[in-house]
Image: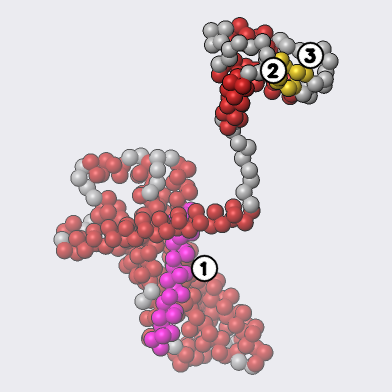
Amino acid sequence: MIATAGGLAPVLAAVRPKAAARPLSLDLSALDAVDTVGALLLLRLVDRLEADGIPVAMTGARPEHATLIDAVHRADRSCEPSKPTDPHPILAMVERTGRAAVQVGRDLRDLLNFLGMMVTALVGTLLRPRRLRLTAVVHHMEQTGLNALPIVGLLSFLIGVVLAYQGADQLRQFGAELFVVNLLGISILREIGILMTSIIIAGRSGSAFTAQIGTMNVNLEIDALRTLGLDPMELLVLPRALALMITLPLLAFYADVVGLLGGAVMCYFVLDISFGQFVQQLHGAITLSTLMVGLSKAPVFAFVIALVGCYEGLRVSGSAESVGRLTTRSVVVGIFLVIVLDALFSILFSYLGV
């Protein structure tokens, strides 16, 4: 029947019963031989008629023919694509959570691997100081430190004003407005100054690191450096990390001073606390360790911000969309890690009684 299938197909397609929706009986008693192609043609005819609402029954087939037709029918039904079913909402949520957890684990593994490469390059540079590119370090110190003074100073001043105003509003209920100075000194020097500075630098310099290195990656400049025998870790990553580790403590100290100045201005206008009284009360409220607790976090935060920014930059693929996406990711991950590390530092300092 394979040889005649081409002629039988249009004949069977032209079969149109005169009475619609009337049950039909397909008599196969005169069928001498049938193969899989013939059985498939018969099944296609039956499916078309039943789709038009006409019941069809095949009768009179020999046992061997009926067995073959039934086998072809089962095989044909098993080849039909199954309709996709929507998963249960809870199962879908569990699946998404699992996928996200696996991806976070992979990202953490890759970040730790990059940390090891970065530390290895840093140790190698310390053993061979002549390989350190001082010009690049100074350039990035200007970009990450000097150029960041206006925005860091403005935000720190405003934060000092807000803390002083809110603290005075609460302490006025107890007649303890003078202790606003204690609140400002301890909160800004220990936590707020370095934390806000690190968040600003993560959004400003961390994103710049990712965008700069990512653009070089898109333009194949990173591959060109490797072809020339230059290590991107020494040429691109270490100067940025060292520059940020030097400038962030200085920026944090600057933010502390400006934040206290903003608080002093607010205390002068709202609480009638003179600058002399402010300084005297501040001197009794804080010690050198209060300042050093905040500044001791700065190099660690700077290293983490540079680590994340450069890591995401080197992950950029060959598209501008990838640069934007990973730059955003760099800021989010950098700020997240800074806050997590700050919480761990707080627990550590509390445990040590500092």
Asked if residue 335 lies in the magenta stretch, the reply is: yes
Give the label on residue 17, or none: 3
Could you tell me which secondary element the residue under label 2 belongs to? loop
Sequence-first disc among 2 and 1: 2
Q: Give the residue pinned by disc 1.
A: 155
Q: Is residue 309 above or below residue 33?
A: below
Residue 193, position in %: x, y?
A: 46, 74
Mark 2 or 1: the one toward you: 2
Check disc 2 and give the amino acid type.
Gly
Give the Cα distance between marks 3 and 2. 20 Å
Badge 1 vs badge 3, beta-carbon distance below 8 Å: no
Could you tell me which secondary element the residue under label 3 belongs to? loop
Q: Please give the range of residues in magenta.
A: 328-354
Foreground: 208 or 155? 208
Q: Is residue 10 above or below residue 208?
A: above
Question: Residue 321, can we see it?
Answer: yes
Check disc 3 and give the amino acid type.
Pro
